[in-house]
Amino acid sequence: KKLLIKKTDAVITVNQSIADIMIQENKIPSINILRNMPSKSKNNSTPDNFELGLPKCKFNLIYTGNVELGRGVAAVIEAYKSVHLDVGLIIIGRGSAYRNKMIEKVNTLKLDHRIKFINAVLPQEVVNVCKLTDAGVAPIKNMCKSYYLSLPNKIFEYIQAGIPVLSSDFPEMKRIIDEYNIGLTFDIEDTTNISKVINELFDNNEIYKLFCENSQNASQYLNWNVEKSKLIDLYQQLT
């Protein structure tokens, strides 16, 4: 890779932090950043009877994506022991052995009435499912540099749904949250801090409404319809 990268006409990566490292390590002048985002939401289709699987809570968070070691799901579940009783959590994604362990953990903690596991839906349905909830959570553990510098697609799914974002306090996720003022970050290693941040969002309706409004505004810019123009421009420069 180090050999080939200097012979290319253009290099693309997914965020600024990774671009900075690649520029420094490979001594190249610049890198194009192309972020992984969903298309702008245009419809409101959701799976049949999906609402029947939501927790009977006043306020529900959603987690979308794989439930695997390092994704921070266990920490959020643990934090729910101190989260307000009116706050639920939907974990949506495909089945796995680790996911089954998390289901067992929820049952052991007697949180199964507030934390629900939903099977994966079609990619084009994810954003509209998120619209049925009140905020999205993106907890990731610092298991490696790739995780620490990640900017997961779920962040932009939540933005397309027009809901606030709560995430691990890592550089790229924090960059988006702070720039657009759409949510809060937490210390993924501190379950007390995670519960504090969730409760803060639930308790402060004024801040919550501001984050929702800002997320809806950000959705006009942070979508694939806009991002793909960068790729098209790059291809045109190379022809």
Image (spheres, rainbow, N blue to C red):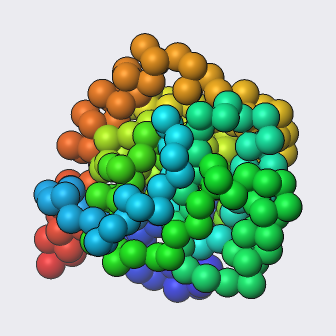
Query: Residue 60 versus residue 227: which sits nearer the camera?
Result: 60
> Picture coordinates of residue 191 (x, y %)?
82, 41
Query: Residue 197 versus residue 45: which sits nearer the camera?
Result: 45
In this picture, residue 236 sits left or right of residue 190:
left
In this picture, residue 113 sits left or right of residue 101:
left
In this picture, residue 195 sits left or right of residue 222:
right
- Position of residue 27 relative to residue 131, above or below, is below
In this picture, residue 73 sits left or right of residue 22:
right
> Is residue 22 at all visible to an observer of this figure?
yes
- Position of residue 94 relative to residue 115, above or below, is below
User: Exactly how many numbered labels are in the figure?
Assistant: 0
Give the residue displayed 62% in from the left and 23% down from the top: 200
> Picture coordinates of residue 170 (x, y %)?
66, 44
Q: Quadrant of the N terminus?
A: bottom right
> Is residue 29 at all visible to an observer of this figure?
no
Query: Residue 222 versus residue 74: which sits nearer the camera?
Result: 74
Q: Quadrant of residue 226?
A: bottom left
Give the residue displayed 34% in from the left and 36% down from the top: 215
> Picture coordinates of residue 134 (x, y %)?
43, 40
- Position of residue 211 relative to residue 163, above or below, is above
Query: Residue 130 versus residue 21: which sits nearer the camera?
Result: 130
- Position of residue 119 relative to residue 181, above or below, is below
Give the residue displayed 40% in from the left and 27% down from the top: 211
Q: Quadrant of residue 218?
A: top left
Q: Quadrant of the C terminus?
A: bottom left
